[in-house]
Amino acid sequence: MADKIQEKYTYNGKEYPCCASLTMGVIGGKWKTVILFHLIGHTLRYNELRKLMPTVTERTLSLQLKKLEDDKIIERKVYTKKPPLRVEYKLTDLGESLIPIISSIAEWGNSVS
């Protein structure tokens, strides 16, 4: 398991009581893991994510993307050179470090369904 045990863990200005709660604070919730799963190996536009996740509301998707961006897990790139405005999302290096975790979660879900 973890090599070092601390009394508190801090990431991106937030404190967590343990390393597991830090991880779940960053990737936990109904939609963050789904977003990350779809971004593995892909750069996707907002509308492409919406099509892959038809039951999520636009507001919720926007909020979850913003949180993942704030936590430096995904990168948002805006193209403004020619209309219409284009926004793409992709995993950062830190986000890519979560691929084994997200893949394991997906494999577990597949095995029990």
Image (cartoon, rainbow, N blue to C red):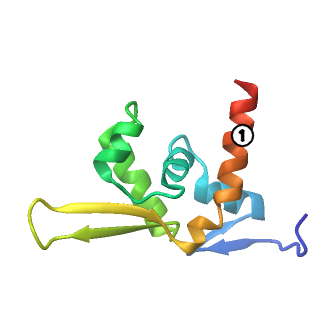
- Amino acid residing under circle 1: Glu
Is residue 46 in view from this perspective?
A: yes
In the picture, measured across the screen, residue 82 lies left or right of residue 55, that is: left
What residue lies at 76% left-to-right and 58% top-to-bottom? 20
Determine which residue is flagged by label 1.
107
Which residue is outermost to the left? 83
What residue lies at 56% left-to-right and 73% top-to-bottom? 93
Query: How many marks on residues?
Result: 1
> What quarter of the picture does the C terminus occupy?
top right
In the picture, measured across the screen, residue 34 lies left or right of residue 4, that is: left
What residue lies at 52% left-to-right and 58% top-to-bottom? 41
Which residue is outermost to the front? 41
Quarter of image, res 77: bottom left
Q: Residues within 10 Å of mark 1 (few under 14, many from 20)?
A: few
In the picture, measured across the screen, residue 26 lies left or right of residue 54, that is: right
> What quarter of the picture does the N terminus occupy?
bottom right
What residue lies at 67% left-to-right and 49% top-to-bottom? 103
Is residue 18 in view from this perspective?
A: no
* Camera-side residue of 106 and 33: 106
Q: Is residue 67 above or below residue 38?
A: below
Helix, strand or loop under label 1: helix
Q: In this view, does 3 lie above or below 42?
A: below
Q: Is residue 8 above or below residue 44?
A: below
Residue 87 x, y percent position in the rendering: 27, 61
